Amino acid sequence: MRLIKGLSLLALLMAVYSCKQPKAQLALSSDLTQYVDPFIGTDGPGNTYPGAVVPFGMVQLSPDNGLPGWDRIAGYFWPDSTIAGFSHKHLTGTGAGDLYDILIMPYNSRFTADLWPDQEDYRPYSMFSHDQESASPGYYQVQLLSSGIKAELTATKRVGVHRYTFPQDDQSKILIDLGYKLNWDNPTDTYLKLQDEHTIVGYRYSTGWAPDQREHFVIACSKPIEAIDFYSDGNKLQSTEAKGPNTKAEITFKSTEGEQLILKVALSSHSIEGARNNLKEECADWDFDRIAEEARENWNDQLHLIEVQGTELQKTIFYTNLYHCFLTPSLHSDVDGWYKGADGQMHQAKGYDKYDTFSLWDTYRAAHPLYTIIAPAKVKDMIASFLSHFNETGLLPVWSLAGNETNMMIGYHSVPVIVDAYLKGIPMDAERAYEACKATANSNAWSLQPYKELGYIPYDLENHGHWSVSKTMEYAYDDWCIAQFAQALNKDDDYSYLSERANYWKNLYDSQSTFIRPKDKNGKFLAPFQAKDYTEPYCESNAWHYFFHVQHDIPGLIELIGKDAFAAKLDSLFSYHPEADDELPIFSTGMIGQYAHGNEPSHHVPWLFNEIGQPEKTQEMVRRILNTQYSTKPDGYCGNEDCGQMSAWLVFASMGMYPVNPADGIYHLNSPWLSEAVINLPNGKTFKIVTENQAPENHFIQEMFLNGEKQTKLTISHADILKGGELKFVLTK
């Protein structure tokens, strides 16, 4: 009997609820970092980086190939063979070419070729081979073949640590390059100063996707600096400091064979003094190996929040994806709480850590619900970070980065993150949080004025028509979330009004084509219309994807179109394949019919078969995606990893569940991909997911038992997970 095909993810999530369990309670039974391969995602469209970082760290110290382009958004691209240096800030898995702050490159007299010989400013590089390169959580090393220098990287939360092992050379050098830029990034003002024989301080201000980025730094050198030259716009200065848009410093020294040099680079968005405090607090000594070991232990604590059993391949895929879930959001405040705010002013986070790098259009779907299970203390700080952004700008963040609002993508999806956290009991200033949600929804930002006035956004309205259908759909979802918040706080009038707005998606439903379709300002549907076309009214998607984007009211969508028509359309989504001459955009990857797993809008759709009594199709499709869209190769992601969303999908699905509506506390079930998963909960309980008859060909659920009691529901609640217990699946062909 093929009833309920997928309850396993829920147990796994429960074990992960807190990120602050004592090590003794975690009872580390093995080194789970051995199953993490940071090179997965560095090829193909994944756009991840392999460098050194700790969970949710401010510093992402990673190699840069030095070449621009879409494939090198994260600074590093597996097929490349050059390294231009190691910079301290990187985005993981996005399509945005920004950051790459404070590049450091060791070199010597052996190799003096210029990476960009057509430019006046000299930038050395080195050849490298993957055979002499390795990475693990919190650590990266590579042999720079052109110079014979071995480079090793590790990090604390706010400090990047370099260790370079040199050959004998009278002209060994360390280049600190603040003018280095890549893709969208462009420095506007930089500063370098030799403070004493071991210390260089400065800042790098830049613009790019995030328009006002500020990184202050303190660089501590283990070897006395005896010879240093400063440059501005390629010109050597007779000074011990440099200021301008393009500055750099070059340290020169004689090295003996095997001599090691350590650099500690502390960052702060607030000030040089803030960076100095961060360095003193986090990295007072010069013990590189100890720092790397602490980073590894930190990662083990995080990874052991979910302990799984499966094949070696499954464990590598699972733990690499879980690792990627913890790379963002990134810490933004100093040890004393100071940070540069989205209003351009300096602020102090009191009683919480300020986080940024919120890719909310992506991560509200699965990554943030995952954090509510495995990292609720971090969620508390993330909500406080949202509210500080609201205090600074009057709006909640959309896609915030480096103390900026980029306004990239659509929706005000900090709302479902806040509402989900509140309804799950995560502490917050509820009245202030509600005020922020309501004020954001009632603003006139992001085409909200016509949305409020007309009940949809017309495609032909000047300055508002871009992504009109997608905006209407996503605003309606966010409004539903605020309505639930209002109801929980007994704000009845707001609940009624926002519940009405939550139905605005119906204003674009066309009964003739049975799609959600663009309308003009007079209420007429756009013609001609092809549902498979990627057109301006749809955000990185087409009408097939956004038809199913009613996460808060799937029953209403089914009722509107009819169950049989809905079932047929759902089947067609996965079977109506693009034709050879169809023009697919760069983000349409991981295609199964019209379904695009490489982008986010359809991530919940495989579970919708559960809603129409066809759970076997959910189980079959989820297993197909797991087996075909993820791998252990460098191109192991079928699309942009997107700050943890692509990874969180796998973490949930492999355990047997997924948050179709990310703010209702319900996880929809599928058959687990793993043989066992244990979620270690913060209350000392565990939630265990086990399978009987687990095999590649067995992806249907025959029976399911929760704490020994037979279950037939296709969902499990967040509250049920937190109680602890065991969920057992009996699988069949």
Image: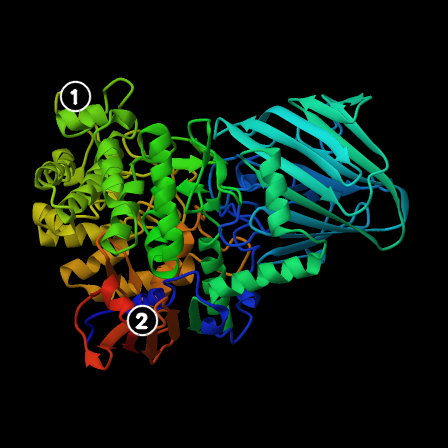
Q: Tell me which amino acid carries mark 1.
A: Lys
Q: Which of 136 and 723 is in front in this view?
A: 723
637 versus 610 height, above or below: above
**Where's the N terminus, which quadrant?**
bottom left
* Residue 594 place in picture, x, y as percent: 30, 47
Q: Nearer the viewer, residue 143 or 302?
A: 302
For marks 2 and 1, give the CA distance: 48 Å
Q: Nearer the viewer, residue 452 or 123?
A: 452
Residue at the limit of the structure toward the top, as seen here: 462
Q: How crowded is mark 2: few (under 14 residues within 10 Å), some or many (20 or more)?
A: many
> Is any atom of residue 183 visible in this view?
no
Q: Is residue 428 left or right of residue 564?
A: right
Residue at 47%, 38% (x, y): give it. Answer: 95
Q: Tell me which amino acid carries mark 2.
A: His
667 versus 275 height, above or below: below
Quarter of the figure with residue 240: top right
Residue wearing tag 2: 699
What mark, if any, has residue 508 been given in the picture?
none
Q: How crowded is mark 1: few (under 14 residues within 10 Å), some or many (20 or more)?
A: some
Residue wearing tag 1: 521
* Residue 612 place in picture, x, y as percent: 14, 59
